[in-house]
Amino acid sequence: MKTDKSYAQHLDQQDNLKNFRNEFYIPNDTIYFDGNSLGLMSKRAETTVNTLMNAWKTYAIDGWTEGKHPWFYLSQKLGKMSAPLVGAKPEEVIVTGSTTTNLHQLVASFFQPEGNKTKILADELNFPSDIYALKSQLRLHNLNPVDHLIQVKSNDENTLKTQDIIDAMTNDIALIILPGVLYRSGQILDMEKLTREAHKRGILIGFDLCHSIGSIPHQLSDWDVDFAFWCTYKHLNGGPGSVGGLYMNEKHFGNEPGLAGWFSSSKEKQFDMEHTLTPAGDVGAYQIGTPHVLSAAPLLGSLEMFQEAGINHIRQKSLQLTNYLMELIETKLTDYNFTIANPKDESMRAGHVYLKHPEAARICRALKADKVIPDFRNPNGIRLAPVALYNTFEEVWQMVQILKTIMDEERYKKYENKRGVIA
Ligand SMILES: *Cc1c(COP(=O)(O)O)cnc(C)c1O
């Protein structure tokens, strides 16, 4: 029977990626389904942090150019390692900044209001940081965000319709910023089609890949996306505050960055110390200052695992995991008022399942007490992310079992239905 534990174990035996689990530290006896918020630490990430700590110890200032991973070229090296995950050329990707600072950099570089083209198009479901950044960028141009930031509406609180976004691409829009995957419902937006439609109307378009990188494949170059940015601590397992990523389509190479600094410089010219910037001829121009070497270090180890596993295999297993999770929810948890609020269609479903329930906050607390780590999202969402590199089908089975017991015994009623500080 598909609902038996033995079936889950059978799926685990057949899993080609199963050995990667041994590469991670799984916090004691927990079922960790929060890898889309903070990915787990891997032994390889630990090793590469130690390698760079030792480079500091051994080489001091010469670490910039000596050792296994010279710091001066680290951002480029990590960009090259990330490029296959977004479907870009190596020189189009750099590891630098954070999601929000990269967004500021990109809007500062590409939002050039002119004539009646003065508005930015976004959506009402995006993560707040992106929206705050867009509003503040508009204010820097003396434009009122109330009428210059257009946010596409959702009909169901969870998802966006491609056609609604296209309809909002009116001729007063200069720039579009959208998530590749929505952080709550996990809906994948049709980045290829949206890019084509934006370009038909002479609008530049960029995507926030925080919830899609490391979870689904992308073809940014083929889709002709103008730019993209992401964090690396979610599916990429780079550790708390690990350095972000930035993609720039090569057709935009050679421009001055909106926010310049000495790391925007062409590497050959950087130490000439001139007061006129010669920007790097590639994506490197969008860096600002000295790279956060120690916060980039874990990525050397963790990205290597993505290279070995391959993003298509990761995607395949991820779909299997979320499919299995939804099947179990639909057969075992029918009587408890849960709604599956993520798109079920595989072309629109990313790496997590989004359950809605009026008691979501305290159900999450009860799950945590039983050593299952979900992710609560205000006001009534439970995100469950079984991660291809380290979660198992058996954990999915166990988690549903535990949730069923919590509901049967109404164990969640012991807790207040309020969120904690973080989630
Ligand atoms: C996680 C996330 C962020 C976080 O931004 P930081 O600058 O890394 O703090 C921003 N936007 C989206 C869509 C996210 O999912």
Image (cartoon, rainbow, N blue to C red):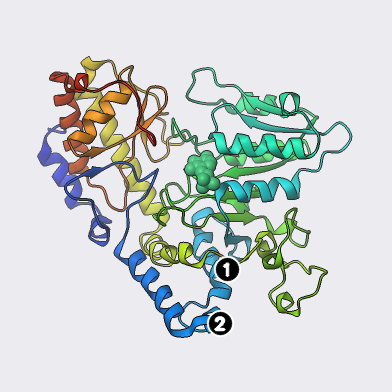
Please tell me whether mark 1 sits on a helix, a strand or a loop. helix
Q: Crowding near pointer 2: few (<14 within 10 Å), some, many (20+)?
A: some
Residue at the image position 81 percent from the left and 35 percent from the top: 142
Residue 148: image quadrant is: top right
Residue 274 percent across, percent down from the top left? 80, 74
Q: Which residue is mark 2?
A: 65
Q: Horizontal placement of 396 versus 99: left or right?
A: left
Residue 112 percent across, percent down from the top left? 81, 43
Q: Is residue 30 above or below residue 365?
A: below
**Of pointers 2 and 1, the one earlier in the residue sequence:** 2
Residue 167 percent across, percent down from the top left? 69, 24
Q: Alpha-carbon distance for marks 2 and 1? A: 13 Å
Q: Is residue 38 visible?
A: yes
Kind of residue at badge 2: Thr
Give the numbered dot on residue 76: 1
Please tell me whether mark 2 sits on a helix, a strand or a loop. loop
Q: Horizontal placement of 317 versus 111: left or right?
A: left
Residue at the image position 36 percent from the left and 60 percent from the top: 309
Kind of residue at badge 1: Gln
Q: Horizontal placement of 398 versus 132: left or right?
A: left
Q: Is residue 195 above or below residue 331?
A: below
Q: Crowding near pointer 1: few (<14 within 10 Å), some, many (20+)?
A: many
Residue 365 percent across, percent down from the top left? 26, 30
352 vs 190, nearest the viewer: 352
